[in-house]
Structure formats: structure tokens, C-alpha cells
Amino acid sequence: MRLGVLDVGSNTVHLLVVDAHRGAHPTPARSEKTVLRLAERLTPDGLLSRRGADELVRTVAEAKASAQRLGCRELMAFATSAVREAGNSAEVLARVSRETGVDLRVLSGEDEARLTFLAARRWYGWSAGNLLVADIGGGSLELAAGIDEDPDFAVSVPLGAGRTTRTRFSSDPPTRDEVASTAAWLAEQLAPVAKRAAKFGRPDRAVATSKTFRTLARLTGAAPSSAGPRVRRVLTEAGLGQLIAFVSRMSAADLAELDGVSPGRAPQLVAGALVAQATMRALGLAELEIGPWALREGVILRRLDQTGGEDHTGYAE
């Protein structure tokens, strides 16, 4: 069965099309991204602007058309922190449904953590033991840990790369004081989270997902995406520290020239690196393995688990 997953995030709207059935490895068939930066479309009073809503409706309609053209029997659409936190989210979701026929499901931060953990568990298997998973999005950081497919510990904190950039930096590149104060602030924010996570024991394997972690690993020497998903990639705390000393002095325009850094993500790179470093330090992790499966794969796997993968059309029209 061909399935489409539409991920409306803080930075991008991402359509992933896969061929999947229960018990099988989901095989990617197509991936399409549109940069919307919805988190930057929020008004000072926390509402998604009319322009932001217009662009969201247009992008969802285009993604639905692509999914249908590619033969998807079902389109599973969800939104994360940017839509979740908008004061007019209910109104925006109703408009998307009315004008596109697509019902966007808003995931809670804990849902994000749990579904991402499921994807990592399926990729690495039971041999990973006590597994810890970290994911940095545009608006939030998700952490989950446990020995089963459903984590014992799952939390979301508002420490995304985009949010941290907007709230902590006032210049490009950020000043030394901004970098230092942000690092100290992140350590304070993560201390109670790390204390909770410690109750569940040291992880046997620590995994990171998301574009932010993949980019940081690439910049510290990991294999490029063209090498395929099964190549082992790691991000070390030592390498990350060296990278921060380098990139924190560069403008977003200069960062965009680096191999593996997209122009859309470049402005958030320094903040994302600081969040990653603070996370590793708070959890006492010297190394993170970069996992190829994350939230979208988790949504697919949960769908197949719950329904058995029956072939039916899932477009709400």
C-alpha cells in the first residue's frame, strides 16, 4: 500500500510517500518539502497571520494533489509546535479542512517524542537495549527513553533551533555574550529534564534524529546523505564543541555556503548546535548516533500497527 505522510512543522511542510504494509520495511518513494517557516508567521499576540494561513492552505492543497498523483491510498497529515501553539489553531485547522479536505491532526509534544522513539526502536531493534532518543525541531526539543517500543520517559521542551534563534539572538552572527548566555540558559532549562531522565538509567544506545542533528554530524565529518541511510553516523560532544567555536563567528549567509547546510536552515544552525551541546552535556552523553528514521516514520508505523495495513482511501473529502 502506498501511503503519504504530511508533516507541517515550524520550518517546513514535508510530504513523504512510502510503500508499506504491516511487518515490512517502509520504502520511500518520494519526498517533497516546502519552506513555510510558520513559526515566524505568528503575530505578536500569538496568532498565525492571515498570510501564514493562506500559504498553509495552498501548500497542503498542493501536497494532497501530489499524494494523489503519486497513487497514495491514504494521506496522514499532522502538525507540530507552530500550529499547536497558535492561539487561532482551531480556526486555521478548520479552514484547512474546509478548503483542502485534509484534516490536520495536531500532535502534542509528548506524542512527537513517543512516535519518534517508536521509529528509532524499530530501526535499531531490541539489541539497542535501553534506548534514548533526542530530536531538535524548529520549535521544540523532544527526548524519550526506555526499553520497550513505548518509552518510559517522553518529554517535549520549547527549545527548538528556530525558537532559540528568535528569542536569544539579536545579531547575525550572534555576539560572544549571546552565545555564552544562551549556553548557560540552556543548561539551566535542561537540568530538571535530565534529572527526570536519569531515573530511568543510563542508555545503552543514544540516538539523535532530525535535520539539525544530521547537519551537525555532517559538519563534524559524518558521511553525506548520498552514502545512504545504513552508514553509521555519529556526533561527538568534543567535535560539536569545536564546531560551535567555528560556526558561531559566521553569518547565516556564510554558513549557507558550507557543505550540507541549506540556506533555509543556516540562520538556525548556531542555536541548534547550542541546544544539541546542552542536551548532550545535561544527559552526560559523549556521543550520539544519527538515526535515519524519525517522526514521519513513526506515524507510518503506528498507522500500520493499529489497522493492520488494510488498503483503503484516507482522504477526508
Image: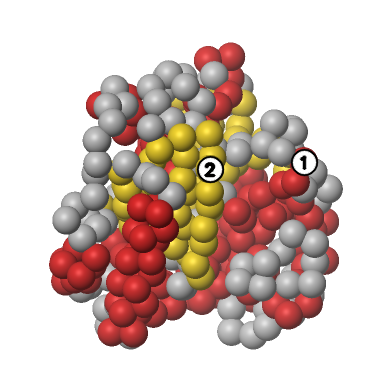
Residue 74 image point, x, y percent: 30, 43
Q: Is residue 159 left or right of residue 179?
A: left
Q: Quadrant of residue 55?
A: bottom left
Residue plotted at (47% across, 49% down): 16
- Display coloring: secondary structure
Crowding around mark 2 (Cα neighbors within 10 Å: few <14, some 14 to 19, many 20+) is: few
Residue identifier under label 1: 227
Task: Give the structural element (helix, strand or loop) at label 2.
Answer: strand
* Count of picture labels: 2
Task: Give the structural element (helix, strand or loop) at label 1.
Answer: helix
Residue 8 image point, x, y percent: 39, 60
Amino acid type of disc 1? Ala
Q: Is residue 220 visible?
A: yes
Please tell me which residue lies in front, 272 or 38: 38
Q: Is residue 159 left or right of residue 231?
A: left
Counting residues from the start of the chain, the first of labels 1 and 2 encountered is: 2
Where 114 falls versus 180 (above or below)? above
Quadrant showing the N terminus: top left
Where 9 falls versus 3 (above or below)? below
- Marks 1 and 2: CB-CB under 8 Å? no
Quadrant showing the C terminus: bottom left
Q: Residue furthest top?
A: 127
Amino acid type of disc 2? Ala
Residue identifier under label 2: 29
Q: Quadrant of residue 258?
A: bottom right
Residue 7 image point, x, y percent: 40, 54
Residue 130 image point, x, y percent: 53, 21
Q: CA distance from mark 1 to mark 2?
A: 17 Å
Residue plotted at (81% across, 51% down): 220
Please tell me which residue lies in front, 47 or 66: 66
